[in-house]
Amino acid sequence: MSDPVLPPAAVGVLGGGQLGRYAVLAATVMGYRTVVLDPDPGAPAGKVAGEHLIARYDDRDALDRMADRCAVVTTEFENPPAASLELLAEHVRVAPSARAVAVAQDRIAEKAFLTGHGLPVGPYDVLTEATSPGPLGDGPAIVKTARLGYDGKGQRHGADRDEALAAWGELGRVDCVVEALLDLRTELSVIVARTADGRTTTWPVAENTHVDGILDLTVVPARIDAQLAEQAVEVAIAVAEALDYVGVLAVELFVVAGPGGVDTLFVNELAPRPHNSGHWTLDASTTSQFEQQIRAICGTAPGPTTMTAPAVAMVNLLGDLWFGADGAKREPRWATAIEAPAAKLHLYGKAEPRAGRKMGHLTVTAATTEDAARQAVELRNGL
Ligand code: ADP
Ligand code: MG
């Protein structure tokens, strides 16, 4: 096992979004230097990093510089080119591995991997020019591009097989999966951190509500029975171990009614990075998912993941909030959120609010999940 990476070594992050920003901040607090690679000069993480390399993710010079400067490199999004990760890995420690990222960035590979390891996924089929689609079932379906989808993008719903196939046309007939549209009881996620020597930590299971395919509300602990929560954690750890994963991994899960009405879990998708549904850990956990990411990729001891409040809720602040009913742009009333004693306001420093764009989030701690959720939603409504 290689030696731990210790401050003041430099940590590199591919991608400069809000997830990278928090990773950089966590590393900075611990005394690491930081380098971010992102082509966007306005990238949120670039503004807080020691160095921002403004270049494409396949830019040879930028990758060389990153390998030269950093002791370890990680990613904050699932789509860094595999070739870039492999190139970096020739010179510097890279976590998670190119292989793990490759599995998580392609829904076809992801589902094959999960199924191959006996992990539960919902009914699905592969849809490519090369494979004639098998029986899709009769019911409603969702077609999802195998690659590059996020926040519900790259997805089309179809009421039946024909509509699903027509929707595939709308998606340009790129490689897709088609999934049966499930009647979800609830959605969960488990964030798991794993070190190279196999130490894993998880946080209490999160319960997630999506609106238009975008995460809207997360409450923790999830309102599910202890046995289901235990199962969810077991599945997430099994995924991390099967991938020989190093870093922070998010496992999104569906809960559906199984035989006899018993709650049944399916893995929806994997994110090879910290996750929006883990943002609450910044305000209500002894160790945040971002600090744990730095600890895990650096090969140091994981921190405790105990909650510091009985319950927490997180609501996303999308760009829509900047536009009133009349469509006129305005700055939301931030003072309301800042003044609420149980709330924490987070804004990512993005210059341009757009509909559906994640601009920030609000966290509220309370005695119960219901109370936390109610307060968080009310506060957001008042912005
Ligand atoms: P993304 O990469 O955009 O997060 P997901 O596959 O997680 O894509 O889909 C986004 C959301 O859409 C899910 O969290 C869920 O609410 C809904 N969804 C996706 N697939 C299904 C499905 N097969 N059945 C029911 N709802 C689904
Ligand atoms: Mg998702």
Image (tube, rainbow, N blue to C red):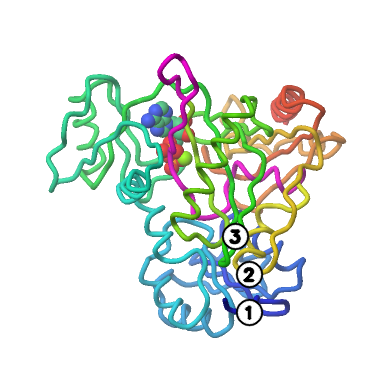
Task: Name the residue that disc number 3 marks.
Answer: 20
What's the residue at 32%, 51% (across, down)? 109
Task: Name the residue that disc number 1 marks.
Answer: 3
Q: Which residues are magenta?
A: 256-284
Question: Relative to 173, does residue 313 appear above or below in the rendering?
Answer: above
Q: For residue 213, say whether it is visible.
A: no
Question: Relative to 251, does residue 16 appear above or below in the rendering?
Answer: below
Of labels 1 and 3, earlier in sequence is 1
**Magenta-colored stretch includes residue 281:** yes
Of labels 2 and 3, earlier in sequence is 3
Give the alpha-carbon distance from disc 2 to disc 3, as whole Å.
Answer: 19 Å
Amino acid type, residue under disc 2 in the picture: Gly
Task: Name the residue that disc number 2 marks.
Answer: 299
Q: Secondary structure at mark 2?
A: loop
Amino acid type, residue under disc 1 in the picture: Asp
Q: Foreground mark, 2 or 3?
A: 2
What's the residue at 75%, 42% (across, down)? 345
Q: Secondary structure at mark 1?
A: loop
User: Residue 215: x percent and y percent?
Assistant: 55, 36
Q: Are marks 2 and 1 in contact (CB under 8 Å)?
A: yes
